[in-house]
């Protein structure tokens, strides 16, 4: 959509006015195929959002968010294809970039989906659903990552009505630009909800940089987060500024078994006692090249939580993971 201004955004980033005219001339058959894949992915995400028990205003925000993400991905696909045609593979260009043209113009998609379901019936009735989706698209030195997660648990005693005892969701969109093999500035937008943790919706805006210590094993991020929080029970809307420190470590324990650890610390600039601390430890066992089983223990600590809201949330999940 023109009002999303995705082309203007990419034009400012890439500083290549020629690609806009090429895109306006109509997509190539390869681009149409890519657009179809992107559209199908976002249609599935939107159908999942429709089924969520969220306020109409939240659905409107998420729909708008997905529209922007879709526009950026479509524009990015066009940009990558046009750059390949514009750069070519001449020896002069190889010398100018200091590497092979094929390497510098690499494009790739990565998907990772998780699903866990527990259903109990009889004397007690309960149903728990945990789902996650992560999709990334890389073109040259640019990476766009979209993520979504959903958790819902409903329970009822014999003969009683079902009611939610846990419900949360989150969607994010992130852009990274690699200025070297180790350093990547990033910017991101996100929205999340967890009424049992005290907020109907929280909108996050991130800006920072990523540093890779060991490729595919250990990296860290430092940045700034601006959050707009809509509290439950008419608590009003507040704006909070956080710092952000994040680190992640991945280790292959054996050929089918891998370990992942991450920790995130968000100090509150206005109230030092209102910091956030999140962390997760997970172990994955590969079943084949695509599917694996994952067990994860997630801990979220909110030092500024006020009773009756608990300061700590713990989640233990076992999910089937599909990665390709």
Image: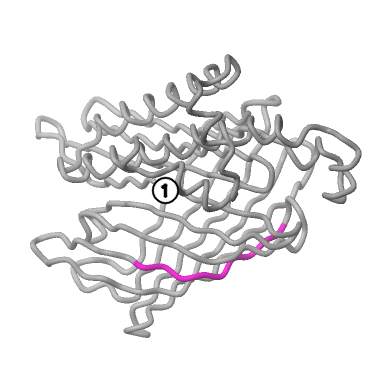
In which quadrant is the C terminus drawn? top right
Q: Is residue 169 above or below residue 215?
A: above
Considering depth in this image, is 59 or 29 the residue closer to the camera?
29
Q: Position of residue 312 (x, y in %)?
A: 36, 65
**Left or right: where 67 falls relative to 91:** left
Camera-side residue of 219 and 124: 219
Residue 197 sits inside the magenta stretch: no
Q: Is residue 221 above or below residue 142?
A: below
Q: Secondary structure at mark 1?
A: strand
Query: Image quadrant of residue 158?
Result: top left
Going by the image, does 191 lie left or right of 198? right
Rendering coords of residue 274 (x, y %)? 33, 78
Please provide percent x and percent y for residue 75: 50, 35
In the displayed structure image, the side of residue 69 where residue 214 appears, left or right: right
Judging by the rendered image, the residue that carries numbered circle 1 is 172
- Percent from the top left, x then y, of residue 161? 10, 34
Q: How is the image coloured?
A: one colour
Q: Looking at the picture, does residue 208 appear above or below residue 155?
A: below
Classify 6 as above or below 204: above
Residue at horizontal 63 percent and vertical 32 percent from the top: 82
Q: Residue at x 55, y 59 (%)?
A: 186
Tell me if 107 is positioned left or right of 198 in this view.
right
Q: Residue at x 38, y 52 (%)?
A: 190
Magenta part of the chain: 218-226
């Amino acid at each position: 959509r023109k009002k999303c201004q995705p082309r203007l955004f990419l034009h400012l980033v890439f500083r290549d006015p020629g690609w806009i005219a090429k895109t306006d001339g109509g997509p190539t058959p390869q681009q149409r195929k890519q657009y179809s894949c992107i559209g199908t992915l976002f249609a599935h995400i939107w159908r999942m959002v429709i089924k969520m028990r969220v306020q109409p205003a939240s659905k409107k925000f998420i729909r708008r968010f997905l529209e922007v993400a879709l526009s950026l991905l479509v524009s990015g696909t066009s940009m990558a294809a046009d750059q390949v045609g514009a750069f070519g593979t001449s020896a002069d260009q190889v010398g100018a970039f200091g590497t092979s043209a094929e390497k510098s113009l690499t494009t790739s998609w990565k998907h990772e989906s998780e699903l866990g379901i527990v259903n109990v019936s009889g004397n007690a009735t309960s149903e728990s659903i945990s789902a996650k989706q992560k999709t990334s698209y890389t073109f040259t030195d640019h990476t766009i990552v979209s993520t979504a997660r959903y958790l819902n648990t409903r329970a009822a005693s014999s003969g009683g009505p079902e009611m939610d005892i846990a419900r949360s969701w989150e969607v994010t969109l992130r852009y990274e630009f690699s200025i070297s093999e180790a350093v990547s500035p990033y910017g991101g937008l996100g929205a999340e909800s967890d009424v049992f943790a005290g907020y109907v919706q929280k909108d996050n805006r991130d800006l920072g940089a990523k540093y890779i210590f060991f490729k595919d094993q250990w990296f860290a991020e430092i940045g700034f987060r601006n959050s707009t929080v809509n509290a439950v029970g008419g608590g009003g809307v507040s704006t909070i500024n956080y710092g952000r420190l994040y680190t992640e470590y991945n280790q292959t324990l054996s050929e089918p078994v891998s370990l992942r650890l991450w920790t995130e610390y968000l100090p509150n600039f206005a109230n030092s006692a209102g910091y956030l601390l999140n962390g997760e430890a997970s172990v994955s066992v590969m079943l084949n090249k695509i599917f694996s089983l994952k067990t994860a223990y997630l801990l979220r600590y909110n030092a500024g939580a006020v009773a009756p809201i608990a300061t700590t949330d713990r989640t233990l999940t076992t999910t089937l993971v599909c990665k390709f």
